Amino acid sequence: ASSLSENLGETSEMDSATTERRDERKKEKTEKSPTQAELDDFFSAAERYEQKRFTEKYNYDIVNDTPLEGRYQWVSLKP
């Protein structure tokens, strides 16, 4: 019977250690959340990259909504 209670004791200790690790991870995640400025910088850089990639691939300026000289010929359609 004592070995059973010892095993139960070990399980409880392991559970509490797991819970403590989870709590520590939650603290790390909340403490290291990026600021709004960091998020804006990250997404604006990604957006600039996508604009540049699209412009180079399709010779179309999506920012100014104008065709550019290059591989594709853009024709204006009237709705």
Image: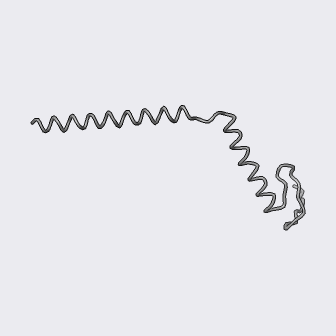
76 or 68: nearer the viewer: 68
Residue ranking furthest to the left = 1
Image point (78%, 62%), residue name: 57
Image point (26%, 34%), residue name: 12
- Compared with 57, 21 (above or below) is above
- Compared with 66, 69 (above or below) is below
Please identify the quarter of the rendering in which residue 66 is found: bottom right
Q: Residue 62, percent across and down?
A: 82, 52
Q: Residue 68, percent across and down?
A: 89, 59
Image point (36%, 34%), residue name: 19
Please identify the quarter of the rendering in which residue 5 is found: top left
Residue ranking furthest to the bottom = 71
Please identify the quarter of the rendering in which residue 43 is found: top right
Q: Is 71 left, or right, of 19 in this rendering?
A: right
Image point (76%, 57%), residue name: 53
Q: Quadrant of the N terminus?
A: top left
Q: Is 79 left, or right, of 29 in this rendering?
A: right
Q: How is the image coloured?
A: one colour
Q: Is 23 left, or right, of 61 in this rendering?
A: left
Q: Residue 34, percent across and down?
A: 62, 36
